[in-house]
Image (spheres, rainbow, N blue to C red):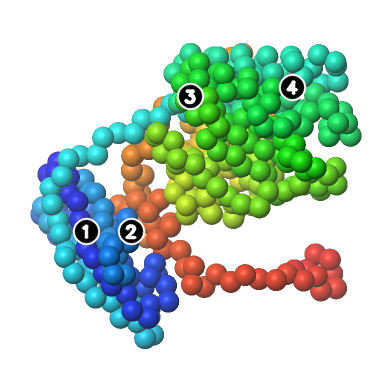
Amino acid sequence: MNVTYHMSVDYLPERVKSETVSISVIYTWIDTQGNWLNRGYVDELKEIAHDWRKLGLQMDAPEAAVKLKIELEFRWSENGLVQWRNPRLVITNRAVSRKVKLATTYYMPERGTADALAHNLCEILLRIDAAGQAGADLICISEAQCSRCTDFNDLFRDTPEVIPGHLSAAISSKAKEYGTYIVFNLDERDGVCVYNTSLLFDRQGQIAGKYRKVHLPMAEAQLGFTPGNDYPVFDTDFGRVGMLICWDQVFSEPARIMRLQGAEILCISTAGEAPIQTAARAVDNGVYVVVAGTNGEQPSRIINPLGEILCEFGRENTLGMSCVEIDLNEKFNRYWESVGPAYGEMRSLYIKERRPDTYKTFKYELKGDSHAY
């Protein structure tokens, strides 16, 4: 068929507790034999006037498709009601690719010398140079590359920096030089507080985003770090990006919250190694995950939404960086992925088929055995 369509329909809910769960528009592409080819949800939601909403989706017809079936579904609502109007299916232009060159880095910082801070910064800048010269659109640097030159107990005295400062200025200059986005981690001093902070620099070298590490391991908390308390995401000229830091990756909630805010790429600056968790974050949320690590055999990697490792390396990489080009508009279809005997797009399905109406905030209390929650 090789035709691209845009499907849309308006709806007005009344007394519906969970619209995501109860209201669905399902499409099915069908071949000449009546076989299902591809199925999914029309799930791009937009608010319109007078409490009406619009669901829409751009769809490429499969090669063998001769028919498109659209189902307007309302279910699992005790007293709810939904009105539909303006169903439309129009031919449109095929979506252009959104190619992005991602770069991650590796460096084991030098420790314990008077010149270590300057040396480590120089090594970081060399890796940015290599990635910038390779045409990277987004470069991720690992956690605490500069502060790890300092004795752990002296960290607060020696390395936290007010932003903007010396370190952020150096990274800003490189972002502007290469016209690239850079995720850079440092210890930030803000008044009496010190945060483990990642900054997103834009192509002009401006700070376009800041994330403060929310989940602090015991050692950092006792040292005196202050945790962050939110999960912001940031728009770039190619898509929406979220940042996590080390211990954050162990917990599933931060990545999910960022995904629900539209994040397509998660950049994880880390010293700890968590290959299983980072692959799970990619698959669970249908996002690309860029990990810049320090410890472990091959702690730096880029993972696609299927959990496949696109690159992975450590100290054996003499450049200390690797680039991978991705297409943010690529579809990841799997056979019988929820939809029956057809192909379904996993990223859409995993989000649409969540049951937020059943998720509660549980208060865990220790009961006798300290391991019982």
Q: What amino acid type should be assigned to the residue bearing mark 3?
A: Gln
Q: Quadrant of residue 7?
A: bottom left
Tell me if 301 is positioned left or right of 315 in this view: left
Q: Earlier in the sequence, mark 2 or mark 1?
A: 1
Q: What amino acid type should be assigned to the residue bearing mark 1?
A: Ser
Q: Which mark is residue 204?
A: 3
Callout 3: SS: loop
Q: Residue at x 79, y 28 (%)?
A: 159
Q: Earlier in the sequence, mark 2 or mark 4?
A: 2
Can residue 367 be seen from the camera position used here? Answer: yes
How far apart in space, not on screen, are marks 4 and 3 (Cα)?
A: 27 Å
Callout 1: SS: strand
Of labels 2 and 4, the one closer to you: 2
Question: Circle 1 sits on which residue?
Answer: 8
Percent of width and height locating residue 78 = 39, 85
Quarter holding the C terminus?
Answer: bottom right
